[in-house]
């Protein structure tokens, strides 16, 4: 999906932050509806650029590396967050998570930037067959489909590190965003929109995404096996989740 705004992932970002992570969301210029820079100039969503074949995972991966550069730059951080004082963020424990093309971009970014210690792809096909050989960071794929995306199979063969594909039953591509939760918060039943939002309870989906994502990040940062959850030994706790492929851990 194009133009999925980071605002539609903010609740999920919040729950992840609640697990003790610093969460930074990225809106990409030309993809986001509007980006306003500190000097006041604005960049709008641009369909002609988005639809060009060169606008795929690479600009998004480059944006992620730029953000990590900035986080490690004390001067830049002091300008952005003056109340925090001139100190960089620690960037030795960074993982990247994305939905849809953002998920594919997380994998491409990890293949190009070793500072990204793990990647998590929520339901994103990896278009353009980007070369991923040499990617040894752990990669988690979460899918709404119970068949494996062919682009994931092509990527899978190249991944040298821990790798896991899980299927989340009763979901759609959009279930991997805040949309169903926002519907519910607005007093709107999600049942008439099952084709769009799936039938899983929004709170349950949030619980699943938070649990698997934080387990994967902890695994990436500690190098440990990842515990019972990632080994597929907690089916009763997460009945909707089934392991489809697993290797190297
Ligand atoms: C979109 O990008 C094209 C090519 O760079 C540019 O000519 C056009 O003005 C842009 N449109 C908007 C709305 O920014
Ligand atoms: C750090 O950020 C400052 C302020 O934006 C910039 O002038 C400087 O070039 C940056 N340093 C590096 C090494 O990128
Ligand atoms: C996959 O999902 C389809 C459609 O929901 C279903 O018909 C099929 O039985 C499922 N296959 C497996 C292996 O779970
Ligand atoms: C999917 O939803 C159906 C209908 O609510 C339910 O019967 C089934 O148990 C759910 N599947 C899983 C794996 O939770």
Image (spheres, rainbow, N blue to C red):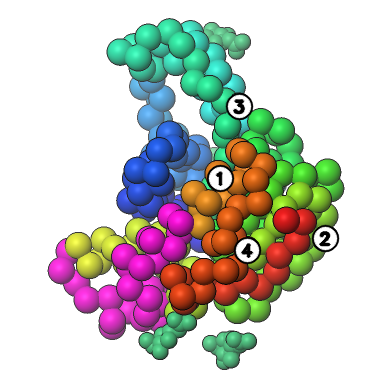
Q: Nearer the viewer, mark 4 or mark 3?
A: 4
Compare residues 199 and 226 and report the one nearer the observer: 226
Q: Quadrant of residue 196?
A: bottom left
Secondary element at tag 3: loop
Name the residue at 44% across, 70% down.
Answer: 237
Counting from the top left corner in percent of width and height, residue 151 is at 73, 65
- Is residue 171 toward the left or the right of residue 15 in the image? right
Which SS type dominates the magenta stretch? helix
Q: Are marks 3 and 1 in contact (CB under 8 Å)?
A: no
- Is residue 143 toward the left or the right of residue 131 in the image? left
Disc 1: which residue: 217
- Looking at the image, tell me whether mark 2 or mark 1 is earlier in sequence order: 2
- Looking at the image, tell me whether mark 2 or mark 3 is earlier in sequence order: 3
Q: Are marks 2 and 1 in contact (CB under 8 Å)?
A: no
Q: Are marks 4 and 2 in contact (CB under 8 Å)?
A: no
Measured Cα–Cα span from mark 4 to mark 3: 26 Å
Disc 4: which residue: 231
Q: Residue furthest left?
A: 187
Residue 205 is a magenta residue: yes
Secondary element at tag 2: loop
- Looking at the image, tell me whether mark 4 or mark 2 is earlier in sequence order: 2
Disc 2: which residue: 157
Counting from the top left corner in percent of width and height, residue 84 is at 35, 14
Measured Cα–Cα span from mark 4 to mark 2: 20 Å
Measured Cα–Cα span from mark 2 to mark 1: 22 Å
Region rendered in magenta: 186-211
Q: Nearer the viewer, mark 4 or mark 1?
A: 4
Disc 3: which residue: 92
């Amino acid at each position: 999906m194009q133009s999925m705004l980071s605002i539609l992932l903010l609740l999920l970002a919040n729950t992840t932050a609640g697990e003790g992570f610093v969460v930074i969301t990225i809106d990409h210029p030309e993809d986001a509806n509007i980006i306003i820079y500190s000097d006041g100039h604005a960049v709008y969503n641009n369909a002609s650029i988005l639809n060009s074949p060169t606008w795929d995972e690479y600009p998004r991966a480059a944006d992620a590396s730029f953000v990590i550069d900035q986080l490690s730059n004390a001067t830049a951080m002091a300008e952005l967050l003056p109340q925090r004082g001139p100190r960089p963020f620690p960037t030795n424990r960074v993982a990247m998570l994305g939905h849809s093309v953002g998920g594919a971009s997380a994998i491409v970014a990890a293949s190009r930037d070793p500072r990204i210690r793990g990647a998590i792809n929520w339901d994103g096909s990896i278009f353009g067959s980007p070369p991923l050989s040499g990617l040894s960071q752990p990669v988690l794929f979460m899918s709404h489909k119970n068949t494996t995306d062919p682009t994931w199979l092509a990527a899978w063969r190249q991944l040298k590190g821990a790798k896991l594909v899980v299927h989340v039953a009763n979901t759609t591509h959009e279930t991997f965003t805040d949309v169903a939760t926002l519907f519910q918060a607005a007093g709107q039943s999600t049942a008439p929109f099952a084709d769009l939002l799936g039938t899983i309870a929004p709170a349950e989906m949030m619980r699943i995404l938070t649990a698997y994502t934080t387990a994967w990040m902890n695994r990436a940062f500690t190098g440990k096996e990842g515990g019972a959850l990632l080994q597929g030994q907690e089916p009763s706790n997460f009945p909707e989740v089934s392991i489809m492929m697993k290797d190297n851990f």
